[in-house]
């Protein structure tokens, strides 16, 4: 028989939550085993993760009792938070450190057995598809770096004061957690891939508009920002219990091979209401492209793949020989193209993708040009949004772009939209970053496209360049705004003449159309 569940504890207010987290971090600063925020945040996260899981288990146990159903906990005694971490009779000092770290230790029940992390890493479901597998994968890549068991006990006592028993409380903590992730970005320095500016994420989700019943994938999900925003977007479409089941199913998928962001992504999605985050802890590039099947294709991909980097030789072997490159972003771009659903019944456009890419992807040649040729000939690259300088400041000044494409291709015309800098600003900075309002103009333009001072259109034929024998020379997508004064001043004269001729041809076409309409009216 399941034990009687504890009654719900009083809700923790936003001020209390903030104070608890601040106090816990101050305690961790005293521990010699931790080195800065890059150690303190994962430490705080796994402690909160276990407290969160235990509170969710209590709620699930109560629901099962009320429904007369049997209940099987994900974490069994004496490894539940309430067994070893509760303020009454919990472990402390060297005993606590030994219980957490060692393969075998004295447990809170007075018996020797597996240590906490050793036990958690060994959890396994019957079919490899529930929260036990998530817990095991999280802790396989996690280490407790706190050396002082008394300080660890102080942190645990503070976190024990957080009660995950109300949706409003969860919402409050999720907002605080987002601020912690932002601090993680600030502390990460050159590892700034942990964080994509939230205005960019929200914009991409809004224009991609994933629908309930579709599958959304981020193959390089980091801490889960795109998936969290997609979850909120899909949750707003839920009207029935069946809708909620659909959302909680396989609607969201991610991939993240690094243990720390994997843990952060799991916690982030759990806090935002996803019961079983489906995050693949392996490298998304590990499967040969030729082996990908239709079952692995998805409706919508939203991602900011890592720039630069260098994959091991075994990973490069998964790509066609003439498409292999050390640039990770280009490997991910090929993967994304292959993982989009083909057009089919009720879906003429097939799968669609929104991807953050560095400027070098737009003008790169060689392998990069061949990949872009594939993109233009077999996919519809319909939009490139050019972000203002400094979006990822201070970690990189590399200009970035958002590319949007689907499988309805081939590409005929590519629309460009240049996000303007706020008035009076020369670039964005860490202290004055991109805001949601800065993207409103592009949102308003998105569904009613016309050329204006920020938007222009380029023919795919003008982008693809071949020699007399039909060999590819270049695919330059790095097109400047022709309406900008500096663009007009610095453009190549031949390019200016070609642009003028194109516009004149279009004017003549319109005049011919008008003449035809006048003649038709006169004949009538």
Image (cartoon, rainbow, N blue to C red):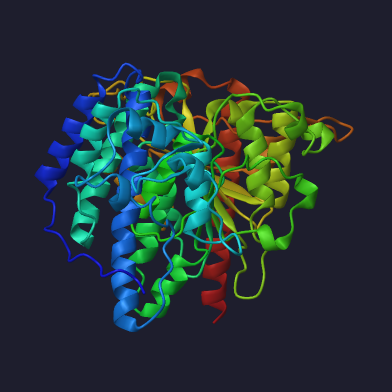
Q: Looking at the picture, does residue 214 appear above or below residue 477? A: below
Relative depth, front residue between 244 and 340: 244
Image quarter of the C terminus: bottom right
Tell me where residue 468 sits by quadrant: top right
Tell me where residue 352 sits by quadrant: bottom right
Q: Position of residue 23 (x, y in %)?
A: 16, 31
Q: Looking at the picture, does residue 308 appear above or below residue 197? A: above
Judge from the rendering whether residue 184 lies leftward or rightward of residue 309; answer left or right. left
The residue drawn where x is 57% and y is 34% is 499
Judge from the rendering whether residue 205 lies leftward or rightward of residue 166; answer left or right. right
Would you say residue 415 is visible in this rendering? Answer: no
The residue drawn where x is 16% and y is 38% is 20
Q: Position of residue 50 (x, y in %)?
A: 35, 47
Relative depth, front residue between 215 and 91: 91
Judge from the rendering whether residue 476 lies leftward or rightward of residue 424; answer left or right. right
The residue drawn where x is 47% and y is 22% is 398
The residue drawn where x is 26% and y is 37% is 179
Q: Position of residue 354 (x, y in %)?
A: 51, 47
Would you say residue 93 is visible in this rendering? Answer: yes
Q: Position of residue 275 (x, y in %)?
A: 41, 61
């Amino acid at each position: 028989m399941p034990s009687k569940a504890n009654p719900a504890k009083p809700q923790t207010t936003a001020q209390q939550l903030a104070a608890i987290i601040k106090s816990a971090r101050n305690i961790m600063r005293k521990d010699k085993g931790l080195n800065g925020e890059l150690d303190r945040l994962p430490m705080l996260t796994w402690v909160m993760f276990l407290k969160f899981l235990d509170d969710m288990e209590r709620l699930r146990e109560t629901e099962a009792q009320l429904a007369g159903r049997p209940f099987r906990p994900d974490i069994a005694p004496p490894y539940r938070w309430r067994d070893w971490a509760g303020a009454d009779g919990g472990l402390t000092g060297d005993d606590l450190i030994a219980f957490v770290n060692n393969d075998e230790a004295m447990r809170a029940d007075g018996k020797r057995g597996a240590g906490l992390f050793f036990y958690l890493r060994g959890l396994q479901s019957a079919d490899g598809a529930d929260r036990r597998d998530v817990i095991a994968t999280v802790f396989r890549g996690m280490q407790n770096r706190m050396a002082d068991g008394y300080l660890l006990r102080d942190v645990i006592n503070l976190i024990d004061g957080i009660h995950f028993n109300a949706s409003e409380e969860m919402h409050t903590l999720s907002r605080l957690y987002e601020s912690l992730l932002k601090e993680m970005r600030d502390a990460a320095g050159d590892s700034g891939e942990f964080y994509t500016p939230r205005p960019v994420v929200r914009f991409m989700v809004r224009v991609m508009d994933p629908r309930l019943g579709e599958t959304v994938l981020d193959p390089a999900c980091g801490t889960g920002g795109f998936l969290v925003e997609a979850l909120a977007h899909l949750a707003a479409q839920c009207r029935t219990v069946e809708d909620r089941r659909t959302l909680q199913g396989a609607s969201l998928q991610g991939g993240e091979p690094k243990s720390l962001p994997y843990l952060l992504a799991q916690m982030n999605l759990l806090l935002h209401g996803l019961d079983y985050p489906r995050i693949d802890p392996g490298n998304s590039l590990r499967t040969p492209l030729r082996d990908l099947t239709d079952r692995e294709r998805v409706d919508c991909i939203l991602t900011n793949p890592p720039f630069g980097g260098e994959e091991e030789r075994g990973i490069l072997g998964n790509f066609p020989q003439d498409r292999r490159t050390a640039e990770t972003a280009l490997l991910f771009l090929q993967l994304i193209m292959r993982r989009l659903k083909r057009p089919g019944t009720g879906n003429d456009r097939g799968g669609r993708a929104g991807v953050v890419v560095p400027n070098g992807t737009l003008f790169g040649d060689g392998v990069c040009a061949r990949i872009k040729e594939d993109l233009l000939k077999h996919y519809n690259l319909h939009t490139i949004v050019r972000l203002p300088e400094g979006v990822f400041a201070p970690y990189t000044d590399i200009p970035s772009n958002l590319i949007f494409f689907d499988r309805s291709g081939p590409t005929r015309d590519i629309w460009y939209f240049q996000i303007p800098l706020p008035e009076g600003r020369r670039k964005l900075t860490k202290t004055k970053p991109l805001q949601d309002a800065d993207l409103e103009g592009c949102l308003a333009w998105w569904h009613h496209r016309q050329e204006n001072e920020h938007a222009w259109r380029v023919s795919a034929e003008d982008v693809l360049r071949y020699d007399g024998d039909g060999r590819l020379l270049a695919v330059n997508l790095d097109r400047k705004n022709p309406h900008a004064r500096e663009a007009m001043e610095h453009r190549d004269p031949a390019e200016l003449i070609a642009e003028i001729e194109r516009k004149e041809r279009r004017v003549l076409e319109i005049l011919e159309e008008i003449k035809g309409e006048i003649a038709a009216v006169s004949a009538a």
